């Protein structure tokens, strides 16, 4: 009894001395963070450095003899179409700046659209051959304009993902730009899946499963940008938790597709590990941010349980995810450290003051999520303004 009284006296006296550190909206008072650390031993909640993002490689294509089709050959813009496709069919498209590359792809798509209707019947032996973006030794050829257009849209999405991944997200403008490009990429991959529905066969990278997975992955990375913006803007812990949870859901969907047929073993192990670790990271971030709100409400039992769930997700993912980029493991290590310190503090306060029961992980309700992103429409992706604005001099 005396022990409980002393613990309560210590807590109330400290609270009176320093005042509430977490305000009503869940934000930490910057004036009192230092004092808060000295009392509770918890680090201030800060934005984390941007983590690496995945970009999609372009599909490569073989030369196409457009003169074999009378509609192409008879078109007023035949020479432009022929030259535009020759530029698209370079041996190493990844060597070109992605913005310039996208402009070239969009120009060829526009010329192609104006020359022939889709679907169409080709003369003689004209066909288009494209290699799998992730397994270049695999290719598919088809006498189908729809297939040609879908491959172009795939590469437009790949270019958008390269632009987004290369943007510095150290500033608000950079995060916003990357978020927009990832949403364009998501829309492009969704469009590829829709365009290929009537095709009899194709490479795995353009299958409905791959298109859906890539769309989810791009949305996950766009949502991650929103999480970075929320942290930088000092949004409340509940808001940050919802944004992080949705990022985790998108990553989980992408990971589930990657480890199931027909995508299983088609992508490099580093890709699978990257997505797996990102899913765990954002589940842990959601738990961590939510636990801050719980602490402010003195719901210490659930706070401890949420932190335990998040830490376990990180530990399990680090043990099984091999080959992900080093900065992701660094991110996981720092986040796990912060969560462990918060949990130690919460356990100490619970032991000395509250004596709340810690609920089992299975009894916890799912954390709320909020999606702030969407897949861009095909008209947005193929907007001529994008072509002109990204064309390099």
Image (cartoon, rainbow, N blue to C red):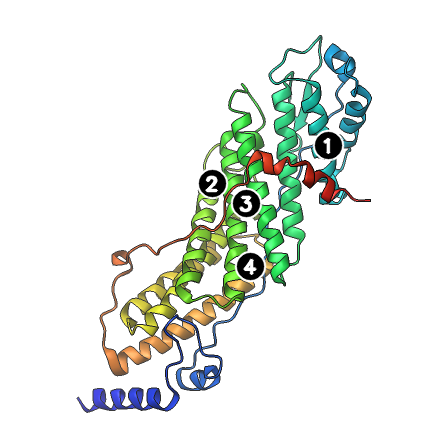
* Closer to us: 76 or 227: 76
Q: Secondary structure at mark 4?
A: helix
| Whether residue 146 is situated above or below residue 212 in the rendered picture | above
Badge 2 local density, few (<14 within 10 Å), some, or many (20+)? some
| Whether residue 108 is situated above or below residue 280 in the rendered picture | above
Q: Which residue is mark 2?
A: 259
Where does the image place residue 187, in percent across and percent down from the top left?
A: 55, 38
**Disc 4 and disc 2: Cα gap in Å?**
20 Å
**Disc 2 and disc 1: Cα gap in Å?**
36 Å
Q: Which residue is mark 4?
A: 328
Name the residue located 67 percent from the left edge and 37 percent from the top edge.
58
The reply to whether callout 1 and callout 3 are in contact (CB within 8 Å) is no
Which quadrant, please, contains the C terminus?
top right
- Left or right: 15 in relation to 43: left
Which quadrant, please, contains the N terminus?
bottom left
Q: Which residue is mark 1?
A: 107
| Whether residue 355 is situated above or below residue 80 in the rendered picture | below
* Closer to us: 226 or 245: 226
Q: Earlier in the sequence, mark 1 or mark 3?
A: 1
Where does the image place residue 355, in percent across and percent down from the top left?
A: 23, 77
Q: Earlier in the sequence, mark 3 or mark 4?
A: 3
- Left or right: 110 in relation to 147: right
Q: Earlier in the sequence, mark 2 or mark 1?
A: 1
The reply to whether callout 3 and callout 4 are in contact (CB within 8 Å) is no
**Disc 3 and disc 4: Cα gap in Å?**
17 Å
Q: Nearer the viewer, mark 3 or mark 4?
A: 3
């Amino acid at each position: 009894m005396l022990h409980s009284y002393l613990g309560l006296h210590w807590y109330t006296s400290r609270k009176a001395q320093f005042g509430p550190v977490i305000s009503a909206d869940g934000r930490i008072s910057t004036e009192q963070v230092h004092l808060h650390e000295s009392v509770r031993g918890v680090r201030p909640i800060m934005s984390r450095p941007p983590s690496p993002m995945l970009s999609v490689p372009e599909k490569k294509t073989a030369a196409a003899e457009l003169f074999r089709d009378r509609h192409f050959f008879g078109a007023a813009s035949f020479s432009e179409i022929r030259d535009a496709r020759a530029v698209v069919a370079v041996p190493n498209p990844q060597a070109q700046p992605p913005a310039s590359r996208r402009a070239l792809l969009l120009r060829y798509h526009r010329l192609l659209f104006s020359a022939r209707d889709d679907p169409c019947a080709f003369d003689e032996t004209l066909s288009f051959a494209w290699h799998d973006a992730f397994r270049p030794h695999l290719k598919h050829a088809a006498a189908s304009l729809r297939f040609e257009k879908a491959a172009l849209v795939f590469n437009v999405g790949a270019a958008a993902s390269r632009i987004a991944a290369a943007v510095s997200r150290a500033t608000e403008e950079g995060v916003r730009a990357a978020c927009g490009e990832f949403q364009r990429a998501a829309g492009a991959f969704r469009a590829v899946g829709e365009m290929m529905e009537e095709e009899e066969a194709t490479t795995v990278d353009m299958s409905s499963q791959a298109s859906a997975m890539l769309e989810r992955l791009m949305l996950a990375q766009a949502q991650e940008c929103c999480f970075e913006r929320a942290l930088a803007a000092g949004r409340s812990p509940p808001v940050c938790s919802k944004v992080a949870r949705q990022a985790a859901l998108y990553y989980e969907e992408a990971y589930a597709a990657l480890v199931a047929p027909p995508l299983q073993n088609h992508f490099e192990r580093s890709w699978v590990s990257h997505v797996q670790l990102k899913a765990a990271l954002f589940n842990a971030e959601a738990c961590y941010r939510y636990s801050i709100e719980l602490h402010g409400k003195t719901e210490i039992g659930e706070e401890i349980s949420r932190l335990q769930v998040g830490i376990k997700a990180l530990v399990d993912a680090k043990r099984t995810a091999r080959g992900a980029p080093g900065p992701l493991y660094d991110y996981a290590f720092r986040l796990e450290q912060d969560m462990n310190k918060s949990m130690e503090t919460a356990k100490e306060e619970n032991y000395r003051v509250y004596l709340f029961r810690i609920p089992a992980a299975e009894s916890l309700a799912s954390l709320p999520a909020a999606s702030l992103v969407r897949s861009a429409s095909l008209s947005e992706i193929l907007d001529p303004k994008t072509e002109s604005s990204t064309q390099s001099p």
